[in-house]
Amino acid sequence: MTAPVLQPIGPFDVDLLAELHRRCFTAIWDRPWNAKSFADVLAMPGAAGEIVRLGTEPMGFGITLQTFDEVELLLIGILPEARGRGLAQLLLGNLLSGATACGARRALLEVAEANAGAIACYTKLGFTSCGRRKQYYPGPTDAVLFEKALNSPRIDDKSRQ
Ligand SMILES: CC(C)(COP(=O)(O)OP(=O)(O)OC[C@H]1O[C@@H](n2cnc3c(N)ncnc32)[C@H](O)[C@@H]1OP(=O)(O)O)[C@@H](O)C(=O)NCCC(=O)NCCS
């Protein structure tokens, strides 16, 4: 089987991201994102993202936003035909490693409470629930907040100086 390849998202990927989003996010609680939505988010300081490919074919993507020592997972989506092969686990692991190397000590995300597959994925990667936002998503559907401690050295750690 072809090995997956991760590629950092660049400014010219916004149309591809909008297309991947349209095909990945089809649940009642999902909100639409167009190319401008992606361009706006990727222009924010601390934004990072990767596309995962099998061969040359894009199969999914993930985007994070880091503010000082916290990193938020904004989106992760894998095309339906490529699910169950560990691609989300690979993407998320790589994005969190990158954030950790940049000083993140805590990862956060929110997910629709009915999104059992995503919740299973986050739980497997060590996230635990830490809150709830009532009727946050269309449906209306509650959002569950998840967090994970990351093993960054403290940014003010004297032993690193
Ligand atoms: C959630 C999503 C990203 C998972 O992608 P994926 O590539 O299939 O996930 P992985 O194959 O890396 O799975 C990693 C682990 O998550 C769990 N998992 C993933 N999908 C699951 C499902 N549908 N049911 C149960 N467990 C699941 C499993 O524990 C799996 O590990 P295992 O296969 O060793 O048991 C994908 O289903 C998706 O794109 N969904 C639509 C978009 C979405 O809801 N994104 C998340 C909210 S932003």
Image (cartoon, rainbow, N blue to C red):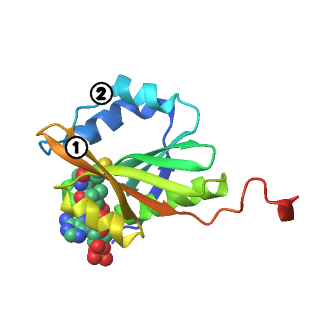
Of the two numbered discs 2 and 1 in the rendering, the one whose residue sits closer to the viewer: 1
The residue under label 1 is 134
Give the x, y percent position of residue 122: 35, 64
Q: CA distance from mark 2 to mark 1?
A: 26 Å
**Residue nearer the viewer, 83 or 55:** 83
The residue under label 2 is 34
Q: Is residue 97 left or right of residue 140?
A: right
Give the x, y percent position of residue 111: 28, 51
Residue at x 27%, y 59% (from the top left corner) = 118
Residue at x 33%, y 49% (from the top left corner) = 110
Say few, some or many: other residues with alpha carbon within 10 Å of mark 1 (under 14 / 14 to 19 / 20 or more). few
Secondary structure beneath dot 2 equals loop
Does residue 38 lie above or below 49 as drawn?
A: above
Q: Amino acid at mark 2?
A: Asn
Disc 2: residue Cβ within 8 A of ligand 1's nearest atom:
no
Secondary structure beneath dot 1 equals strand
| Quarter of the displayed picture in which ligand 1 can be seen | bottom left
Give the x, y percent position of residue 107: 49, 55
Residue 85, can we see it? Answer: no
Q: Amino acid at mark 1?
A: Lys
Residue 37, can we see it? Answer: yes
Residue at x 23%, y 32% (from the top left corner) = 32
The earlier-in-sequence mark between 2 and 1 is 2
**Do the residues under discs 2 and 1 have CB atoms within 8 angstroms?**
no
- Residue 98, quarter of the rendered image: bottom right
